[in-house]
Amino acid sequence: MLLGFIVLYILGTILIGVFASTLVKNSRDFILAGRSLPLYMVTFVSFATWFGSETVLGASSVMASEGLYGVIEDPFGASLCLILIGLFFAKKLYRMNLLTIGDLYRNAYGRKVEILASLMMVFSYFGWIAAQMVAVGIILHLILGVPHSVGILVGFGVALLYTFMGGMWAVSLTDFFQTLMIIFGLLAVLYEVSSGFSQVLPVLASQPMDYYRFFPEPTLKDVLLYVSAWITIGLGSIPQQDVFQRLMSAKSERVAVVASILAGFMYLTVAMIPLVLAVFARVKYPELVSSDPQLMLPTMILEYSSFPVKILFFGALLSAIMSTASAAILAPASLLSENVFKPLLRGLTDKGFLWLTRFCVLIVSLVSLAFALSGDSIYHLVGSSSALSLVSLFVPLVAALHFKGSNPYSAFASILSGFLLWVYMEYILKSEFALISGFFASFVAYTVVSLLFKLFRNR
């Protein structure tokens, strides 16, 4: 029966993609859904984009083993990001009427910075997309017993097919239904596991107070690492195409602002459910926590839940994964087509650009598939995505939006200094402070070069 449900789910998703393709008349429809999405849909799409395998499988496993302090980065930092975007970025970005966030870097700093920023963003997505494919492989292997690689190929094929056909329209329509599945599915699981919610408070209260510690110890090291956890996604995901794409798909400036804030609170609320389920797993089935943490919740549901709840849980999990995968595929594909390839193809018609973007969807999917088949874990694949954009792209973005006197030299210095220091400290020194050091270097480089540029220009 589970197999039948999975087949129906996949067919339904593909059919929505086929329908969405009929709504695509031009490249703007494919990339931004014609800038026509209402408030409820932009909210659901923004929520569903980030509520992926790392939220259900990754954060829950960390919660079970480390407690609340271990999940500051996600969901708390992720929710902060969406709220900050709504408060400080959405209005200005929407008024610019751009196709991609790479266009902002071109307008502010020129073509060379546009290419550099766009390529760095594109690269940051591969691990994130691969993580979703790996998660599909894990689920299908667990449920059906198929080889892990076969499950990955199924996830790859479905996400590629409907994103290729319908673009942002397909992503938006599928995300709407997938969000409903996520919410109702997780609530149903919690209802059964907690005996009608009656055991939620007793089980949560069974853990020591230190398990729910939210603030760091008053030492410099702990405070710096705590700040790093908040800003990895909290600031690092602001200069990303997937977030920008949802804002620009809204039918009005007000919708873009309100939807982002609502999505932030919605994400934080719904993401609490997997964390609560993780505590139940820790209390009732401690043997699951000590085994493969990525399989903790799926195994608990398979072995100890009723059949209807199994359907709802795996429906919610597949929905979370597929919604994130499709959005993460479309974002870098849009950057590649608009900001890297299109300027090289003079005289390209809008229809040609539409098919160029679809071709880029294929390229991004294939590269991500290679990452997925490499054998890395979900958390490892996702880990560096937001960090890369934080240490290189955040400072130039904020400067372009909120400060006058932007120049390409400052942007280049900021992007390269932050990125190179982060890579050196993260992968060579293996330092815990790589992220915050790279971020600080990016800020200092932008500030110093801007002051020098202004000084020499006024001479």
Image (cartoon, grey):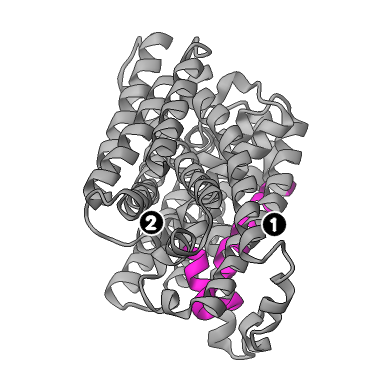
Residue at point 42%, 57% (across, down): 388
Rendering quarter of residue 14: top left
Q: Are marks 1 and 2 in contact (CB under 8 Å)?
A: no
Picture coordinates of residue 145, whole percent (x, y): 27, 52
Q: Residue 420 lies in magenta, yes or no?
A: no
Picture coordinates of residue 303, whole percent (x, y): 44, 63
Q: Nearer the viewer, mark 1 or mark 2?
A: 1
Which labelled disc corresponds to residue 302?
Answer: none
| Mark 2 burial class by Cα count in 10 Å: few <14, some 14-19, many 20+ | some
The answer to which of 132 and 276 lies nearer the viewer is 276
Relative side of 44 to 397, left or right = right
Q: Secondary structure at mark 2?
A: helix
Q: Residue 67 lies in magenta, yes or no?
A: yes
Residue at point 50%, 16% (across, down): 19
Q: Quadrant of the N terminus?
A: top left
Compared to residue 437, the image places residue 397 above or below, namely above
| Mark 1 burial class by Cα count in 10 Å: few <14, some 14-19, many 20+ | few
Relative side of 129 to 109, left or right = left
Picture coordinates of residue 177, whole percent (x, y): 59, 33
Which labelled disc corresponds to residue 269?
Answer: 1
Task: Please name the residue that numbered disc 2 is placed on.
Answer: 416
The answer to which of 333 and 96 lies nearer the viewer is 333
Residue extent of the magenta highlight: 58-87
Compared to residue 124, the image places residue 39 above or below, namely above
